[in-house]
Image (tube, grey):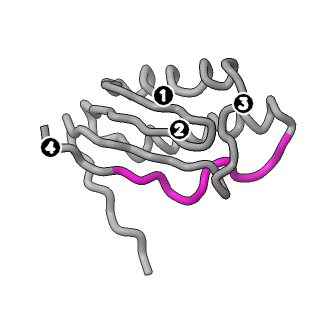
Amino acid sequence: MAWPLRIEFSGALYHVMSRGNDRRVIVRDDGDRNWWLARTVETYGWRLHAFALTDNHEHLFVETPEPNLSAGMQHLNGSYTSYYNRRHRRVGHLFQGRFKSQIIDN
């Protein structure tokens, strides 16, 4: 069965969630936290209204001026996984499955 399509449009507000694979840790220290988000927000022009980064999952409340949520999340989770695996000398998936997103009606 195919994944349901994500609804993306300019100016959309989303609550986005990703969980660590097998509910494992995705950040170990402030070095990981500092690297985590800034590059993606800047690269994709997102307006980040709020976020929560816990040890094993992330929540974002983000506005996308362009319809680029999927591309940005692929960049965020993919580049962060590469960084994390290199820094902590590990291999494999860091995040469990696809990210989840809910459109927020403002």
Residue linked to disc 4: 105
Question: Above or below — where is 53 with respect to 103?
Answer: above
Q: Which of the marked residues, 1 or 2, is nearer the chain's N terminus? A: 1
Q: Which of the marked residues, 4 or 3, is nearer the chain's N terminus? A: 3
Under mark 4, the amino acid is Asp
**Magenta segment includes 25:** no
User: Helix, strand or loop at disc 4?
Assistant: loop
**Towards the viewer: 24 or 101:** 24
Name the image quarter holding the C terminus.
Answer: top left
Query: What's the CA distance linking mark 1 and mark 2?
Result: 7 Å
Name the image quarter holding the N terminus.
Answer: bottom left
Residue linked to disc 3: 28
- Which of discs 3 and 1 lies nearer the camera? The answer is 3
Q: Which of the marked residues, 4 or 1, is nearer the chain's N terminus? A: 1
Question: Above or below — where is 5 with respect to 63?
Answer: below
Query: What's the CA distance linking mark 2 and mark 4?
Result: 25 Å
**x, y percent for residue 73:** 47, 42
Are circles 1 and 2 on residues that touch, CB within 8 Å?
yes
Residue linked to disc 1: 40
Residue occupying image coordinates x 24% and y 30%: 65
Query: What's the CA distance linking mark 2 and mark 3?
Result: 20 Å
Residue linked to disc 2: 75
Under mark 3, the amino acid is Arg
